[in-house]
Amino acid sequence: MSILKILVVDDEPGIRSGVSRILRNFRVDYPFMEEPYEFEVYEASTGESGIEIIETNQPDILLLDNKLPGIQGIEVLDYVKKRKLNIVVVMITSYASLELAVKATSDGAYDFIPKPFTPQELKSSIENITKRAFLKKMTRDLQDSGKQVRFQFLSVLSHELKAPLNAIEGYLQMTKERQLGDKIEDYNQIIDRSLERIKGMRNLILDLLDLTKVESGKMKQDISDVDLLKIAHTAIETMRPYSIQRDIVINLDVPHNLFVKADAEEIEIIFNNLISNAIKYNKKGGTVDFVISENGDSIEINVKDSGIGMTQPEMDKLFQDFVRIKNEKTKNITGSGLGLSIVKKLVENYGGKIDVCSVPDQGSQFIVTLPKEKPCL
């Protein structure tokens, strides 16, 4: 849970207590946030006492009335601006002073809320400020992560999202203009192509979300005894439509129910990526052998395909972020270049390891070794 500190500076006790009451159990949560935000509210009845609180316990958000008994709110705003404090200032003012509030926004205030305001109006403003604070934090984190990572990140987004969007736009335009005829079946091929492009974009977005969670250490884990046979069946069924489309047979070999202490969703991510890769880089009509075995205090997961294989230089860079093997055989295969990178990070988080061996034109074999008990790291 993240906490944002809010300071209310207003000489009306009803306003201060009202804000505290409205925000006491209020939470802001969006799907793109790592965790919801709650609020800790401080109160001040004068500009002078507000500045004292700013000095001792700098808030994230300042709800500031202009008409105060001592120094005016606009002077407090000027103080925050001159000190270059990272505080989002919102003016709360009567309708009669709207002109002053508008001036305050031009002087550095983020927004203003006219009095009297409803609980929903206050919550809506706080939601917008919280979203802004979260996005600013993301921007700072991205800046701190290094230029090369940013360049790779933006390159992947620009290529992997822009290109399919352009294609889908073209297909829709063809359909709108009835370029292929007036019957719906005339457009089956371009509908299939559009759906394939959308699937690729969805997979990229999911990969980026997984990578972000793993890298940030914010991936919420639910550690329990995970039945690997059950997860293997789920992963195979998830990939079944793709394997049927490519006429790939998946052979599962698990001698009995094997368990590891892990997060079931993370194990499923590992299995999904390994099986997906084995199908994607296989030959039409090929096979995937998925074997899980026990070796003392460890579990070995072995995924072997009969596909196009790799050279040693290609294997050397295989687990890097955004890296895709590019050659004549893979030029028509789409992907984010993140799947195996995510697998490696997850496996190593469990104190395990992943190895690969491959022969061009004969296939590849990935071996994941996981301890049965997740170590305390």
Image: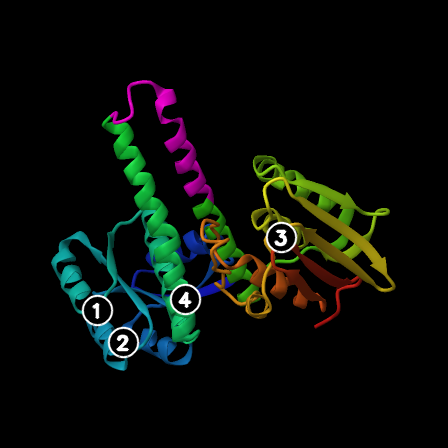
Residue beneath disc 3: 269
Q: Residue 256, how many percent across, how many down?
A: 86, 46
Badge 1: residue crowd in 10 Å (few <14, some 14–19, many ≥20):
some
Q: Residue 209, how many percent across, how many down?
A: 50, 56
As displayed, is residue 300 above or below residue 177? Answer: below
Which one is in front in this view, the residue at disc 4 or the one at disc 1? 4
Query: Which region of the structure is painted magenta?
Result: 178-199
Residue beneath disc 4: 152
Decide: marks 3, 1 in contact (CB < 8 A)? no
Badge 4: residue crowd in 10 Å (few <14, some 14–19, many ≥20):
some
Earlier in the chain: of badge 2 and badge 3, it is 2
Q: Quadrant of residue 137?
A: bottom left
Mark drawn on residue 80 = 2
What amino acid type is highlighted by mark number 3?
Ile
What amino acid type is highlighted by mark number 4?
Gln
Q: Residue 76, how many percent across, how many down?
A: 25, 74
Q: Secondary structure beneath disc 1?
A: loop
In 3D space, how far apart are the residues under numbered discs 3 and 4 (Cα atoms)? Answer: 23 Å
Q: Secondary structure beneath disc 3?
A: helix
What amino acid type is highlighted by mark number 1?
Gly
